[in-house]
Amino acid sequence: MRAELQRTEKLQVMGELAASIAHEIRNPMTVAKGFAQLLQQRSKDDTTLRYTGMVMEELDRAETILSDYLSYAKPKMECVQIIDIKQQLNHVINMMGPYAEAEGTTIQCHMEDGLYIVGDERKLCQVLVNMIKNATEATDGNGRIIINSYPFEGNAVIDIIDNGIGMSIDQIQRLGHPFVSNKEKGTGLGMMVCFRIIQAFQGKIEVKSEEGRGTAFSIKIPLAPENAGSDRSIQADRTIVKQ
Ligand code: ADP
Ligand code: MG
């Protein structure tokens, strides 16, 4: 409990820090990227082209880290509305499908109609993008991601299941801790942001994973009040609850 409190406090401080410096860092980065782009357009030799490309790639990476930080600092809903889960999932899948496909991963969906929650749809979108990206990165070759959405015990449930590399118990326990990444170019911030956003939705994220077999994430968010009657309560089997 004490460790949990310390962790919350640490994350809080980090969020505040992020809010105060991220904007300031973004501006000079945008300028630097602009000049790198100019250089690239004018360069005639391959080496300069390659180096400016690398500069821009790294600046993009820094931009991703900053965006993740900023979302962490601002998990609050800015635009609260009724969200149609199926519509939102379709939107995200249209966005992420081509990326997953390019990586050799297919996405299959089973979405129930008439599932509504209340919140900021851009935040939900960010969570889904982060998690589908992770699922894609976890698979290689014949990757498969299954996305299901359905009502259960007063919640809208979104399952994101992949047949990727899976996680060890230790990795699961450290999931959502800042900067904990097992990827060469990972930031280790994506899941931290996901947990925080879903918490702001009054929901939770559960995870079940097995090394070498895959991972099943389950996002549970309370149904919109007028929607709660549609619950069909299907039995689920999830082991580790992170929140
Ligand atoms: P990043 O993707 O930058 O590494 P995240 O916070 O998104 O940071 O994820 C943290 C870590 O959690 C990843 O490096 C990976 O080891 C693990 N992880 C997250 N999602 C999955 C998944 N679907 N399958 C396997 N490992 C995962
Ligand atoms: Mg990630």
Image (spheres, rainbow, N blue to C red):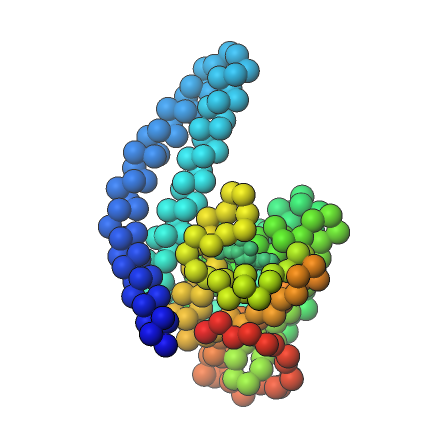
Q: Quadrant of the N terminus?
A: bottom left
Q: Which residue occupies the extreme left position in the image? A: 20
Foreground of the two, 140 or 67: 140
Question: Residue 140 location in percent, x, y?
Answer: 69, 49
* Residue 215 position (above or below residue 53): below
Question: Residue 109 location in percent, x, y?
Answer: 67, 64
Instruction: Tell me which residue sits at (29%, 37%) in the image.
Output: 27
Q: Which residue occupies the extreme right position in the image? A: 142
* Residue 237 position (above or below residue 213): below
Instruction: Tell me which residue sits at (37%, 24%) in the image.
Output: 35
Q: Is residue 112 left or right of residue 3?
A: right
Q: Is residue 88 visible?
A: no
Instruction: Tell me which residue sits at (66%, 61%) in the image.
Output: 211
Q: Is residue 231 left or right of residue 38?
A: right
Q: How many marks?
A: 0
Q: Is residue 116 left or right of residue 136?
A: left
Q: Quadrant of the C terminus?
A: bottom left
Question: Residue 108 location in percent, x, y?
Answer: 70, 61
Question: Residue 123 location in percent, x, y?
Answer: 43, 61
Instruction: Tell me which residue sits at (44%, 28%) in the image.
Output: 55
Q: Is residue 239 visible?
A: yes
Foreground of the two, 29 or 182: 182
